[in-house]
Amino acid sequence: MEERAVKKQWWKEKVVYQIYPKSFKDSNGDGIGDLKGILEKLPYLKNLGIDMVWLSPVYQSPFIDQGYDISDYYKISEVFGTMEDFDTLLAEAKKLGIGIVMDLVINHCSSEHEWFQKALKDPYGEYAGYFYFEKGKDGNPPSNYRSYFGGSAWEKVPGTDLYYLHMFAKEQPDLNWENPKVKKELFDMINWWLDKGIAGFRIDAIINIKKDVNFPSYEPDGPDGMCACTAMVERVDGIGELLGELKRETFAKRDTFTVGEVFNLKEGALEEFVGEDGYFSSMFDFAPHMLTEGQNGWYDTREVTFLEWKKTIIQSQMECQGKAFLSNIIENHDEPRGVSRYLPEYAQNPDGIKMLGCVSVLLRGIPFIYQGQEIGMTNCQMDSIEDYDDIDTYHQYREAREAGLSDKEALEACYRFSRDNARTPMQWDAGENAGFTKGMPWLRVNENYRMVNVADQEKDPGSVLHFYRKLIALRKSEEWKNVFVYGEFLPLFEEDESLFAYARTDGEKKAVILANFGKEEMTVKFSENLGKVLLANMYRPQQINAREVVLEPCEVLVCQVCE
Ligand code: GLC
């Protein structure tokens, strides 16, 4: 193993929990989660074994993209509370040994940000240079880029022949990273947050910050005559200089944890991004989540087999072994719930849910647990498109309808892939609104809250929640930490179509993780002896003491292996 793999760094040993603040816990009855609600639940997170909490954006925002459109980087949105509430949360979390990771959205800001407002007032002045204000070509936008949320990535600057670039919504103008003033403003802001004592940042959409400022048009990839704006992102060189500078001016000055949201990474760039001297501590492994992606959005996704999904995870693990430390998720605020997505119907039960959690949390890398994952929350079907509250869901629905799908068919696509699947309120108990709010929740509560909620699972030692606690405790235990955190990842039975199996070893001790995703029981044979049982989701004696083991459907078993 290379140095990087075993180099001890504080953040490698952590388990991170992602909070989507709007939907976590409402303390004041306005139907929207808030910082005081999070404060109230810190002991719950501590109890789960969480060391760091990533907060999706809590900054001032008009919420066109649920806070990923920031209008003031130095203010907390009033729907979430005040800066004082934030400071209290940070201090109280620290007392419990929990670090706060902020979301860093610096590819774009909100069109309501002061910079953009000033730019609109003086489209040829200083602040226009904070953005990309470009002349159109022959009465058309400067190029044929399609934004991530559909439609042209260029919007007219009112009263001029200029257009501004927005790779996401038109209310999210892209910041001009070629302008030293912009970089200085952003670096100052980042250092201001770091001065407060936060543990680090999750860095949003960061691959997009480098633009080809000639903005060439590319071959259209759809009937709208446009091409995805990623066509430019994938071709342009020079992002490294920007990210290197970002790191030098901010994160590197202290021991900051950073995790990048990086899509469209160029081949061979893994180490440059997250290697020993990489721009970030870690980045998410999205490879398994990208598999479903089709040509035309959610209505046109691919079916993915278990084998394909498993092999993709294994491939990511092998690619980064000895080189980098990825961050592993089964879901987040942009992805459907893992239980609904990765478990076949027969496995969508507490055993299956524990099995999925187990294979994910014990992978090499940093486990990220998204709120509600630890109790097995599932996708949520809304009655109509109006019940959703997500700009991307509206766009995907529209695209499906334009492609000729019926309302029902277009909704089906949303049932499977809408970002709101994971954004419904956290299910705390079986009472009104799942104990999330005393008011009217901003987004519908999933009806299954009477069956799936924290309070009931607290009482049941066999629950998914209790299993997650044991799972996290095992990963962090003095006895096994070195294996599960720093140890090597060794895939097993790679070609098996229902078994997900791997070993982890630090050279001294070795454990295997065996998970039967199939419908039938199976016998797994080893050349080594299976010994002490470290974790199981079904009844097992403390020792196996055999070279073979029979696994029930949906059974997961973690045990020590000895020569
Ligand atoms: C990231 C966020 C997503 C947001 C987008 C634009 O992908 O995770 O929620 O819509 O960036 O900021």
Image (cartoon, helix red, strand yellow):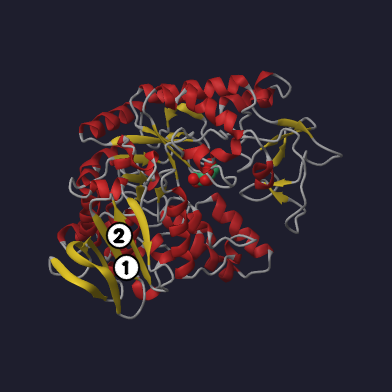
User: Who's the residue at 23% across and 35% down the image?
Assistant: 97
Q: Place residue 557 in its image quadrant.
A: bottom left
The three-letter amino acid code for the residue at tag 1 is Ala
Does the image show residue 278? yes
User: Who's the residue at 23% across and 66% down the image?
Assistant: 537
The reply to whether the C-beta atoms of the residues labelled 1 and 2 are less than 8 Å apart is: yes
Residue position for label 1: 515
Horizontally, residue 501 falls left or right of residue 455, namely right
Does the image show residue 438? no
Secondary structure under badge 1?
strand
Which x, y percent locates residue 226? 74, 51
- The residue lying toward the viewer, choosing from 33 and 509, is 509
Crowding at mark 1 (Cα within 10 Å: few <14, some 14-19, many 20+): many
Q: Quadrant of the C terminus?
A: bottom left
Which x, y percent locates residue 399? 65, 59
Residue position for label 2: 358
The three-letter amino acid code for the residue at tag 2 is Cys
Which x, y percent locates residue 520? 33, 81
User: Who's the residue at 69% across and 31% down the image?
Assistant: 132
Relative to 16, residue 252 above or below: above
- The residue lying toward the viewer, choosing from 507 and 406, is 507
Secondary structure under badge 2?
helix
